[in-house]
Image (cartoon, coloured by chain):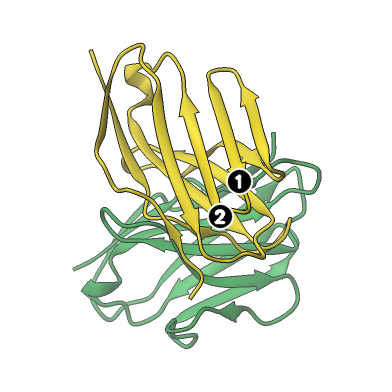
Amino acid sequence: GAVVSQHPSRVICKSGTSVKIECRSLDFQATTMFWYRQFPKQSLMLMATSNEGSKATYEQGVEKDKFLINHASLTLSTLTVTSAHPEDSSFYICSARVLGADGYTFGSGTRLTVV
Amino acid sequence: QKEVEQNSGPLSVPEGAIASLNCTYSDRGSQSFFWYRQYSGKSPELIMSIYSNGDKEDGRFTAQLNKASQYVSLLIRDSQPSDSATYLCAVSPGTASKLTFGTGTRLQVTL
């Protein structure tokens, strides 16, 4: 089946630095990618929707200048957490809808720890 | 605020029993409904989808949808210890629109 490859799976960074998370669609083209964040024992919260070739749409309360999303091709979407702080430590997951398939395919997630 | 509500649990059932998970949603315009299973530290994996009122069965899993009551449920028959996980209900207004997730119900299947 369709796979969304997400990297890195884990990252530890220092406060104030930036981290880039990549999601690649394998064997299919993802015109839209959804980015979620999940804090411990909480549900997935949609951060933004990225569309290939256009600006991402951010959910209310999500800082677009802090969470930079790029969707420059049909197979790659990236999320960059800029000037990371400890409160940004979370589990970040991307997701795409595959045409003809049921449901949404999720990446394996990135555990970000900011120290 | 469009919401999806689930009982956080934990729901504890003995091995071999039926586990019943429930979900209510507030947006009457919702068209697509999904149940995802999430193991600790992992990303969600699709268990069932349902789009029309009634029941949908797939192996040990049955999803039930009642749009009039804005209610969707998941039944797991012959529960196994490997079913122990958090089950997330997700709702979408369309077939390719963003998902709104519930907080999840933690299921524990005991030996």
Q: Residue A68 in the image: state x and y as whole percent.
A: 51, 79
Residue at x-position 54% and y-position 45%: B72
Q: Residue A38 in the image: state x and y as whole percent.
A: 37, 59
- The chain that hosts pointer 1 is B
**The color chain A is rendered in:** green
Local crowd at mark 1 within 10 Å, few (<14), some, or many (≥20)? some
Residue at x-position 31% and y-position 57%: A42
Local crowd at mark 2 within 10 Å, few (<14), some, or many (≥20)? some
Mark 1 vs mark 2: tell me if same chain.
Answer: yes
Residue at x-position 39% and y-position 42%: B42
**The color chain B is rendered in:** yellow
Residue B47 bears which disc, if any? none
A102 relative to B89 in the view: left or right: right
Which amino acid, by three-letter code, is at mark 1? Asn
Task: Determine if residue B43 is in view.
Answer: no
Closer-to-camera residue (B6/A103): B6
A29 relative to B57 in the view: left or right: right
User: Mark 2 — residue?
Assistant: B70
Q: Residue B102 in the image: state x and y as whole percent.
A: 43, 55
B38 relative to B54 in the view: left or right: left
Image height of A23 relative to B39, above or below? below
Image height of A8 relative to B38, above or below? below
Residue B66 bears which disc, if any? 1
